[in-house]
Amino acid sequence: MERKSFTLALLITSLALVSCQNTGFPLIGIMSVPASNTLNNEYYQAQNNFSYIPESYIRFISQTGAMPVLIPFDVPQKTLDKILDNLQGIHFIGGGANFGSDS
């Protein structure tokens, strides 16, 4: 599951970079948060953590004329550095996120 999320993020980023180069739209990264246990259990039944970004953030950035680039919270540092090098801005979403143990 983690590998699929990582691969999907790279694909989305690559497509956004190509689109930006062709259209001139600025790329704005949106850093995801781990999904809550409620979301995970009720909707996705994922065995591992997965990224969550509310759709409204994507829509808001798109409405400004920018291209949103979704960044998983658990992307490896080397990959994150490559993504950040190609962005014109980044949005860190707010809200609660449990980065510790569930106990």
Image: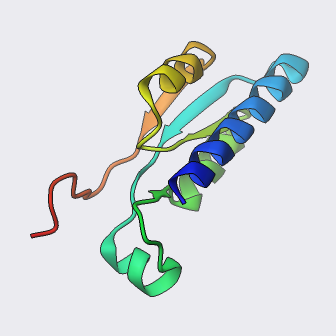
The correct choice, above or below, for 80 with respect to 72 in the image is above
Compared with 79, 6 (above or below) is below
Percent from the top left, x then y, of residue 21? 84, 17
Q: Residue furthest right?
A: 22
- The image quadrant where one finds the C terminus is bottom left
Position above or below: 43 against 71: below
Total tally of numbered discs in the picture: 0
In the image, taking residue 87 as reference, residue 21 lies left or right, namely right
Residue plotted at (49% across, 44% down): 72
In the displayed structure, does residue 33 sit left or right of residue 60?
A: left
Asked whether 55 or 10 is in front, the reply is 10
* Left or right of 36, for residue 28: right
The residue sitting at 15% across, 54% down in the picture is: 100
Q: Position of residue 19 (x, y in %)?
A: 84, 28
Image position, residue 77 (x, y; %): 42, 25
Name the quadrant of the N terminus: bottom right
Residue 91: percent from left, percent from top: 46, 35
- Seen in the image, is 12 located left or right of residue 58? right
| Residue situated furthest bottom in the rendering | 42
Q: Residue at x 47, y 80 (%)?
A: 45
Outermost residue toward the top? 85
Residue ID at (59%, 18%): 88
User: Residue 20, located in which quarter of the rendered image?
Assistant: top right
Q: Is 7 situated above or below 76? A: below
Colour setting: rainbow
